[in-house]
Image (cartoon, grey):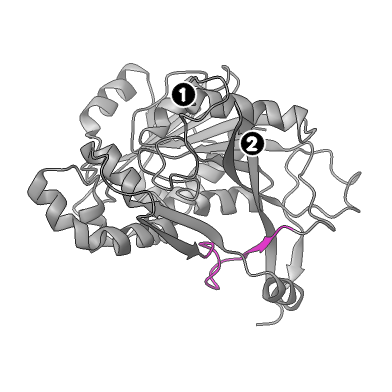
C-alpha cells in the first residue's frame, strides 16, 4: 500500500587496483541525504525512510541488477584440476537484490551521483566469500546491514567462480591472494575514498572464515558462517549447521568449547525475541533434518543461478567423484530465504551490538 515506508539502500559497484589488476568490489550502504550531515553524532546513520511512492519512482528509473558470471573453466580448474576448458565457457546472470520481492521494508536502489555519497564516518563490514563463491554470495546480508547504517564491502577473491580477474597477471609477478586484496581494500577506504571508518567487522562463509581470522586487529568484530570459529579478539560469532556436508561441524564444536563460546538457542531466535545483549563470543548451531546445508547460508540469487547452471553437471561430478560442496543438497532444499530469516537479523543485531 502507498503508506508503507522503505529504508533506502544504495548498491554501488566499485573496483580497487591490486598490484595492477582491477578487482571488483560490491558495496551497499545507507542512503545519506546531503542535508543530513550534522544531525547525527552516532556512527549508525540508518537509512532515511521514504514513502513507497517516492521509492517506487526511484526504483523504476534504476532497477538494480547484480551482474554475476559463472565460469565453467574456473570451476573445472578449481574442483577437478582441469585446464582444458576454454575461457569463453561461462554464463552471465542478472541477479536481483534479495529484498526486491516486496518483502520487508528495505528498498535497494542503484548509485546516482547526485546524493549517494559513501557514508562517513560509518561502521565498515567486509564480506568474505568462500571457495568458488562470489562477491554477491552474502548480498542479502549486505543489504540488511546497509539498511541499519553499515557501509558493506564485498571484494571478489581469487577463488571466485566468476573468474573476474586473473590473479597471476599482477605487475610485480607475485600472485594476488586474499590478503593482498583485503589490504588494498582497507587502504582504499582512507586513501582513495577519504573515509574514516567508525569501527570494523568482517563476515566470512566457509573458506572466508580463514580471511576473517587473518583480517584486522583485536578490536574488530568477527562472524564465521559454515566454517571454523575465529579465536581473535573479544567479539566473535559462529553459525554452523549439523546438515553441512562440506565442512564437518565436529572440529568447530571442539574449538567453540575450548574458546568458551556461549550457545544461542535456535527456537529463541526463531521467535525473533533477541536478548538485550548477546555474549561477545556466541554461537548458533542449526539442528534437525531440515537444518541448512553449506550453501543455504548464501543469498537466493547466487544459489539459484548456481543450481540452474550446475544441475546438468551434478550427475557427471558425482560419477567422477568431484566434490560438489552441497550444491546437490541445495538443489532439493532451496532454503536460502528460510535460513536467512534467522541468520540475517542475528548477524545484523550482533554486529550492531559489538561495533558501537
* Image mark for residue 16: 2
Horizontal side, residue 264 vs residue 119: left or right:
left
- Residue 43 shows up from this direction: yes
Quadrant of the image containing the C terminus: top right
Instruction: Identify the image quadrant of residue 191.
Output: top right
Q: Position of residue 330 (x, y in %)?
A: 26, 57
Region of the chain picked out in magenta, as a range: 96-111
**Magenta-highlighted stretch: main secondary structure?**
loop
Q: Taking 168 as reference, is 97 above or below it?
A: below
Residue to which mark 1 is pinned: 175
The residue that appears at 78% across and 36% down in the rendered structure is 121
* Image position, residue 276 (x, y; %): 56, 40
Q: Quadrant of the N terminus?
A: bottom right
Rendered residue at 79%/52% (across/down): 32
Q: Nearer the viewer, residue 193 or 16?
A: 16
Q: Is residue 167 above or below residue 151?
A: above
The picture places residue 147, in percent across and down from the top left corner, at 65, 53
188 left or right, relative to 153:
right
Circle 1 crowding by C-alpha within 10 Å: few under 14, some 14–19, many from 20: some
Depth check, front residue: 21 or 261:
21
Q: Secondary structure at mark 1?
A: loop
97 part of magenta stretch: yes
Amino acid at each position: 500500500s502507498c503508506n508503507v515506508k522503505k529504508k533506502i539502500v544504495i548498491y554501488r559497484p566499485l573496483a580497487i587496483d591490486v598490484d595492477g589488476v582491477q578487482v571488483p568490489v560490491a558495496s551497499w550502504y545507507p542512503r545519506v541525504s546531503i542535508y543530513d550531515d550534522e544531525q547525527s553524532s552516532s556512527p549508525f546513520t540508518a537509512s532515511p525512510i521514504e514513502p513507497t511512492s517516492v521509492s517506487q519512482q526511484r526504483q523504476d528509473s534504476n532497477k538494480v541488477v547484480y551482474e554475476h558470471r559463472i565460469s565453467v573453466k574456473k570451476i573445472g580448474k578449481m574442483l577437478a584440476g582441469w585446464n582444458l576448458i576454454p575461457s569463453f565457457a561461462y554464463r552471465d546472470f542478472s541477479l536481483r537484490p534479495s529484498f526486491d520481492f516486496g518483502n520487508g521494508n528495505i528498498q535497494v536502489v542503484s548509485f546516482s551521483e547526485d546524493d549517494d555519497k559513501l557514508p562517513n564516518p560509518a561502521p565498515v563490514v567486509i564480506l568474505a566469500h568462500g571457495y568458488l563463491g562470489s562477491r554477491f554470495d552474502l548480498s542479502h546480508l549486505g543489504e540488511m546491514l546497509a539498511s541499519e547504517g553499515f557501509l558493506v564491502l564485498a571484494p571478489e577473491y581469487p577463488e571466485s567462480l566468476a573468474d573476474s580477474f586473473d590473479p597471476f597477471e599482477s605487475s610485480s609477478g607475485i600472485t594476488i591472494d586474499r590478503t593482498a586484496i583485503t589490504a588494498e581494500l582497507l587502504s582504499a577506504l582512507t586513501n582513495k575514498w577519504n573515509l574514516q571508518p567508525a569501527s570494523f567487522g568482517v563476515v566470512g562463509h566457509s573458506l572466508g572464515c580463514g580471511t576473517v581470522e587473518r583480517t584486522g586487529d583485536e578490536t574488530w568484530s568477527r562472524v564465521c558462517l559454515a566454517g571454523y570459529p575465529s579465536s581473535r579478539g573479544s567479539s566473535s560469532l559462529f553459525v554452523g549447521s549439523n546438515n553441512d556436508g562440506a565442512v564437518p561441524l565436529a572440529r568447530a564444536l571442539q574449538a567453540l568449547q575450548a574458546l568458551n563460546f556461549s550457545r544461542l538457542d535456535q527456537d529463541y531466535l526463531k521467535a525473533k525475541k533477541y536478548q538485550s545483549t548477546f555474549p561477545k563470543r556466541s554461537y548458533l548451531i542449526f539442528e534437525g533434518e531440515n537444518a541448512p546445508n553449506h550453501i543455504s547460508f548464501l543469498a537466493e540469487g547466487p544459489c539459484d543461478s548456481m543450481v540452474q547452471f550446475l544441475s546438468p553437471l551434478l550427475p557427471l561430478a558425482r560419477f567422477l567423484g568431484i566434490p560438489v560442496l552441497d550444491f546437490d543438497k541445495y538443489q532439493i532444499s532451496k532454503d536460502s530465504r528460510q535460513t536467512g530469516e534467522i541468520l540475517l537479523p542475528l548477524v545484523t543485531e550482533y554486529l550492531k551490538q559489538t561495533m558501537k
